[in-house]
Structures are given as C-alpha cells and as structure tokens.
Image (tube, grey):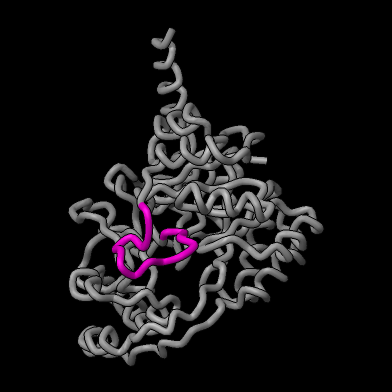
Amino acid sequence: MFDELTFPVVAAPMAGGPTTPELVAAVSEADGFGFLSAGMLTPAALAAQIDRTAELTGRPFGVNLFVPQPDTGADVSAHRTRLEAFAREYDVELGEPKWDDDAYPAKLDVVLGKRIPVVSFTFGPPSPSDVLRLHDAGAKVVVTVTTPEAAHRAADLGADALVLQGFEAGGHRSLFTDDPRLPGGGAEYGVLALLRLVAARVDLPLIAAGGLVHGADVAAVLAAGAVAAQLGTVFLRADEAGTSEAHRKALALAERETAFTRAFSGRPARGLVNKFMDALSEGAPAAYPQLNNLAGPVRKASAKAGDPEAISLWAGQTYPLAYDASAAVIIERLKVEARDAAARLDRIR
C-alpha cells in the first residue's frame, strides 16, 4: 500500500473546501497519494467528487470519513449568546445547533459502491462490522490516531495502517474522546514522539502527520520508521486547492499564531488565531457537530465577504513555510528536499 508509493507523500484530507478532486488527482499523478475528504459533504456530493477524481487520474486515491460522535448533551446556550454578536455583524441567522451523524452510513455505502481502495477514518475507529465490510470489498482501512492507546485500539479492531497525528497538525485533532477540561481535548504528542511510541507497541504501517511541510520533514519521519508522510498545510496554497481567498491571504501574510479552539465546531482544531477565536474559544463546549452547525452561517458569510476574522483558518504550526505553486511543483520540490536531507545522513557512520 503506502510503502509501495513511488514517493511516500500523502495529501491529507482537508474538509470544508481545501481538498478538491483536482488536488487529489494532481498529487496522485505526481507519484504521491491523495485523499478526498467526505466530512461535511452530502453523499451525492461525495459520489460526484469521487467520479470527478476518477476522470482526472487513473491512479488510486482514498476517501476519509468522519466517524459520528456521541451527543455529549453539552449546554451550548452561553456560546450561542456570545455568537449572536457575530451573526449581527455579518447579518445572518445562526444555524440550528443540532446533532447529526454527517450521513456516515450513506457515505460508507458510497465508498463501498465506488470500490475505493483505501478508506481512512477521523475522530475514532470504524466499528468491527464496518471494518469487515470494507475488507470484504477489498478496501484497506486506515485510522487516524493521536495517542499510543488509540493506536493500539485501532490495531485491535483490524486497521491496516495508522495515521499518527502530532499536535503540530492543522485542522481537527482526531481524538477518540474529547476531554472538555483540556484545550487540546487530550494528550498532546509531537509527531516524532508519537511515531516512536506507537512503533514500539503496534506492528502496522505508520503514516506520520503534523507540521510536515518540507522534504527534510518527509525524510525525518521515514528515518524514524514511518512508511509515508501525510501533508496538509503545504497543499493549502496549491493551485488546485479549494482554499478560500481570505484563508490564502492570511496564510501568505504569515502574521498570525496558531492555537487550538473548539469555537468553530465543538471539537479541538488548530488554526490561525482571528477575532472569532479570540472572542469565543474560552468556554466553548465540547459539542460537535452542534457548534459546527450553529456557526456555519457566520463562517460562510465571512468567507463570502473575503474577511478572515470569522472563518476557520485551519493550518499547522509550520504554515509560514508553505507557498503558492501547483501540486506537481510542490511534490517535485519535496522530492529534491528529501533527497538532499537523505544525503546528509551519510555523515552517520
């Protein structure tokens, strides 16, 4: 699978717009491996994106699914009251803070029907019965984890490979359980520490993720035992990415710090600090997807206005090192950088 890639780089699935069929196809055509993100898409939209990607490349690609979260029953009323100021500023009505399963069963049926060869999961492991269905269909199962304990659990459930997400990563943390007492929702392991700890406990192919934007990062995680590196932030400014213009400009200016917040969705995610995060992060309840549904109209209005202050500017800690280029150019640059880094290892005797 991933250890057979010509170039061991995986384009991370980035929900909410940045991941497009064009980006996935371009990365796969450049000897990497691309993942579509099914999160927050309708089943019909997912099917259309799969078909479009297949039109653009004959090479394999994967799909990532959000595992449904239990309804925590958290009180969102105080958060809603504070959010009303943003709704007035952007002249929109807030969404309904309802729980939903992101149409997970229907989307799982889509990937099974489309014979997707690799299916990855975020926010938790699939059920044993879903693993069996995927294996019976010939698909490989990949689970994204943030701790050694989660890695062990995913392995026991029959995962074929693991994505190890360090705390440096942008976007949502793939926590199996979100602890509302902690800003990051749980233990925070750097990607190299997590890689070594999991490799000592689990005999599965490991894909490293978290703040990897340079070919030397790819070489580093391979040297540490990963079979591939998963990169997201470096592709946010790719020509083929669906990243909004306001998000692109904020990334290019590279003036903001990154931090974890639950304010946008109800689950911890790393992004560039903006007015929305400053105002609403403290006290935001662990209530996904209720907060995601509640704040959706504000995010859309902010993006439409080209205003970065109320959109989720997801990005990893190393985002200032990303750049504007086609996915093919980014991959080629990563290859050169990785080879240069590998050559420096000749100093070790």
On whether residue 186 falls in the magenta region, the answer is yes
Q: Residue furthest top?
A: 349
The spot of residue 133 in percent (x, y) is 77, 63
Q: Residue at x 34, y 45 (%)?
A: 323
Residue 26 appears in view: no
Q: Residue at x 59, y 38 (%)?
A: 31
Tally of numbered discs:
0
What quarter of the picture does the C terminus occupy? top left
The spot of residue 165 in percent (x, y) is 45, 49
Q: Nearer the viewer, residue 282 or 62?
A: 282
Magenta residues (range): 173-187
Q: Residue furthest right?
A: 136
Q: Nearer the viewer, residue 58 or 32?
A: 32
The spot of residue 61 in percent (x, y) is 64, 51
Q: Is residue 56 left or right of residue 272?
A: right
Q: Residue at x 53, y 61 (%)?
A: 122
Residue 212 appears in view: yes
